[in-house]
Image (spheres, rainbow, N blue to C red):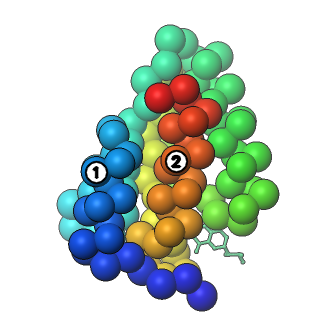
Amino acid sequence: MVERLSAEARRTALLRLKGWSEVSGRDAITRTFTFRDFNEAFGFMTRAALVAEKSDHHPEWRNVYKTVEVVLSTHDADGVTARDIALAEAMDRIAGA
Ligand code: H2B
């Protein structure tokens, strides 16, 4: 079982993750990615899904045309853990951010 990050550790991690912020009222982080078109947005989701499945850590996300709204939280820990930070970093890399 992974441990939830302390508020301090989460803040430090978020300083490195540009574009990501805390979800209000919930221990989770969020970022909305905007691409040029649906094709790019879905390509991002496809590649991120492979990373998620391989690491057995899955996003909550919503796609509307060229935007992908992502919320990351570790359900087993009921909060943000190092797994969410690692997936956020992988998503940023995939998006070329
Ligand atoms: N994804 C996320 N975001 N949080 C989890 O706690 C989680 C997961 N747990 N993916 C995994 C799957 C768990 O349910 C399986 C059984 O390993």
- Residue at point 61%, 19% (across, down): 40
Instruction: Please indicate whether residue 33 sits to the left or right of residue 53 in the image.
Output: left
Q: Nearer the viewer, residue 27 or 14?
A: 14
> Which image quadrant shows ligand 1?
bottom right
Above or below for 50 versus 34: below
Which residue position is annotated with label 2? 89
Q: Amino acid at mark 1?
A: Leu
Answer whether labels 1 and 2 touch (C-beta < 8 Å): no
Q: Is the CB atom of the residue marked by disc 2 within 8 angstroms of ligand 1's nearest atom? A: no
Q: Residue furthest top?
A: 36
Q: Which mark is residue 48?
A: none
Note whether residue 19 is visible: yes
Q: Disc 1 and disc 2: Cα gap in Å?
A: 12 Å
Note whether residue 64 is visible: no
- Residue at point 50%, 50% (across, down): 88
Q: Quarter-wise, where is residue 26 in the image?
A: bottom left
Q: Residue 85 placed where, x, y %?
A: 48, 59
Q: Residue 49 placed where, x, y %?
A: 70, 46
Q: Quarter-wise, where is residue 57 in the image?
A: bottom right
Above or below for 60 versus 73: above
Q: Along the polypeptide, which appears first: circle 1 or circle 2?
A: 1
Counting other residues with Cα less than 10 Å from the Cα at mark 2, is it few (<14), some (14-19), or many (20 or more)? some
Q: Nearer the viewer, residue 39 or 82?
A: 82
Q: Amino acid at mark 2?
A: Glu
Q: Which quadrant: the N terminus? A: bottom right
Q: Residue furthest bottom?
A: 1
Is disc 2 placed on a helix, strand or loop?
A: helix
Above or below for 25 versus 5: above
Q: Residue 4 placed where, x, y %?
A: 42, 80
Which residue position is annotated with label 1? 15
Instruction: Please indicate whether residue 34 sits to the left or right of residue 2 in the image.
Output: left
